Amino acid sequence: MSDIKYYTQEGLDKLKDELYQLVSVERPSISRQIAEARDKGDLSENAEYAAAKEAQSMLELKISKLQEVFGNARLLDERKLDITKVLIFSTVKLKNTQNGAVMSYTLVPENEANIKVGKLSVSSPIAKGLLGKSLGDKVEISIPSGSIAFEIIEISRLNA
């Protein structure tokens, strides 16, 4: 069963770079380590060889999983998304109706979330409460520490 995930161009580029690093840099490095350990003699008592083979197995598993993720990755062109409703890749400016604080979040896939830069996972409680809402809507969002009321004051695209 495929597990299709949507990415921005930036997220897809990071995924591609990570895969390139594993295949083109780390795989040859581990191969060299195995060859060097093999040259040291008896493999049955060679802890260096065993450790290098274990590292190779872990690396190959990681590469395989990343290739699967990359194979199921889909680029979403955020320029074509409707900005009248909150969707994935929307940047949403919110006003906390209780204290008047204004904040802005961009809703992104889980793998691209980074709250420090305002990228909120689409599966987070706040994002789930915002999805499908429109400009001016007031939403009550349940979070682990209670409930917060927000008003949507602006919706734009990620790269608007």
Image (cartoon, rainbow, N blue to C red):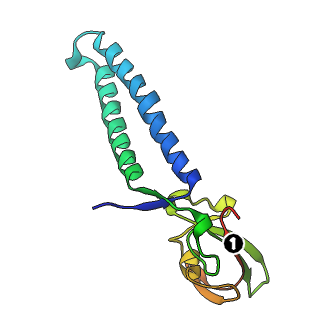
Relative height, residue 59 to residue 12 (above, below): above
Residue 19 falls in image quadrant = top left
User: How many numbered badges does the structure rendering display?
Assistant: 1
- Residue 120 in view here: no
> What is the residue that sits farthest to the right in this orientation?
100
Pick the residue in front: 117 or 160: 160
Q: Which residue is mark 1?
A: 156
Q: Residue furthest front?
A: 80
Taking the spot 22% from the left edge, 17% from the top edge, the residue there is: 43
Quadrant position of residue 46: top left
Residue 149 at least partly seen: yes
Q: Quadrant of the N terminus?
A: bottom left
Q: Is residue 109 above or below residue 26?
A: below
On the rendered structure, is 87 left or right of 65?
Answer: right
Q: Mark 1 belongs to which amino acid?
A: Ser
Q: Quadrant of the C terminus?
A: bottom right
Direction from residue 44 to residue 68 in the image, left or right: right
Q: Is residue 34 left or right of residue 113?
A: left
Instruction: Give above or below for 76 relative to 133.
Output: above
How far across and down, in percent of the image, does residue 17 sit? Answer: 52, 40
Q: Nearer the viewer, residue 58 or 1?
A: 1
Mark 1 neighbour class, 10 Å CA radius: few under 14, some 14 to 19, many 20 or more: many
